[in-house]
Image (spheres, rainbow, N blue to C red):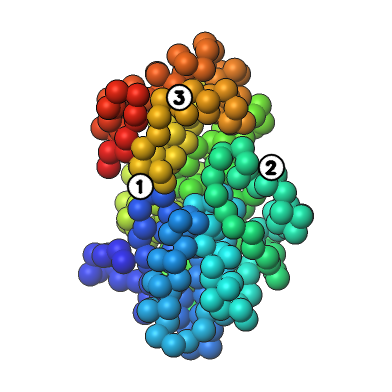
Amino acid sequence: MSALPPALPLPPSMRVFQRGWLSANNILFIGDDATALIDSGYAIHAAQTVALVEAALNGRPLDLLANTHLHSDHCGGNAALQAHYPHCVTAIPVGEARAVAAWDQDALSYRATGQQCARFTFQRTIAPGDVMTLGDLSWQALGAPGHDPRSLVFYCAHQGILLSADALWENGFGVIFPELEGESGFTEAADTLDMIARLDLRLVIPGHGAPFTDVAGALARARSRLDYLRADPRRNADNAVKVMLKFLLLERRHITMAEVVALFETNQLMAGARRRFLGGEALQAAERTAAALVRAGAARREGDLLLNHD
């Protein structure tokens, strides 16, 4: 659970489970009348997510599970929570309803990224502008495209708190995935940052990393980063393939270089990024990406094996 400065405590009805980068942070609300959880982490951490929620609720049921967006690290625990709390209502972004109902793993990105997500259901949708009561407080859903075109963030004006998902981190934001497939994402990300700048905020709880209070500083860093990526879209593609490979390393702990080469040949997003932006053969892309992770201290090589390094 994250620690906040004493002068800026969370409302008593809120708990933040700060997870590692493989699983998104979870925000638990324990209100007088109802409980709710925002985002549920990655599939291989689903049992841990259930245990964290169960311990914090101390015998109370989970009434509502809501997702900011449906990338696998934000909803991978949905199925386990639904099994554990069969009367829990699940609410997803309205733009994902058709894909989830049909369990279209192409539309949901799971097949494209090569990531896991157990099938789950939903009973409600959330659209930009909708207002929900979470932890006895009023929260408004706001559209936050860029990283994901259908992503939402949640804003409590009374408390000056934003649950920013992957639209804004303390040092950046999530990969701008639409640009990898030739769709617009940079402009939408910039508009989302402008929208966040207009909010009256004292605290941001991001999808990854610790909650933070220097919102102006985070926005400045995010805009600088976005300007850098927009200046040469190959930079976004290069960052994306490194992030995707690191995610697989976090999950598997090690991967052979032959498997990395195969990713750049067959994985929809990684192979597409290579062909559209990065150029070269799969072997070159694999070696270049692995070397970049090693230089950054995020991985290490032992012969033909690439190992995770935290």
The amino acid type of the residue labelled 1 equals Glu
Kindly identify which residue carries mark 3. Answer: 258
Kindly identify which residue carries mark 2. Answer: 106
Along the viewing direction, whichever of 185 and 155 lies nearer the viewer: 185
Considering the image in quadrants, where does the C terminus appear?
Answer: top left
Task: Indicate which disc, 3 or 1, sits on the residue closer to the N terminus.
Answer: 1
Task: Indicate which disc, 1 or 2, sits on the residue closer to the N terminus.
Answer: 2
* Relative image position of residue 253 (x, y in whole percent): 35, 42
* Relative image position of residue 56 (x, y in whole percent): 38, 78
Query: How crowded is the residue under tag 3: few (<14 C-alpha within 10 Å), some, or many (20+)?
Result: few
Q: What element carries label 3?
A: helix
Task: Indicate which disc, 3 or 2, sits on the residue closer to the N terminus.
Answer: 2
At 52% from the left edge and 12% from the top edge, which residue is drawn? 281
Kindly identify which residue carries mark 1. Answer: 170
Cα–Cα span, label 3 and label 1? 35 Å
Q: Of discs 1 and 2, which sits in the foreground?
A: 2
At 56% from the left edge and 64% from the top edge, which residue is drawn? 78
Cα–Cα span, label 3 and label 2? 25 Å
Label 2 near label 3: C-beta < 8 Å?
no
Q: Is mark 2 on a helix, strand or loop?
A: loop
Is 50 located above or below residue 204 in the figure?
below
Query: How crowded is the residue under tag 2: few (<14 C-alpha within 10 Å), some, or many (20+)?
Result: few
The amino acid type of the residue labelled 3 equals Ala
> In the drawing, what numbered circle is on residue 238?
none
* Relative image position of residue 154 (x, y in whole percent): 53, 62
Asked if residue 130 can be seen in this view, the reply is no
124 relative to 239 in the view: left or right: right
* Relative image position of residue 76 (x, y in whole percent): 53, 57
Determine the image quadrant of residue 23.
bottom left
The amino acid type of the residue labelled 2 equals Asp
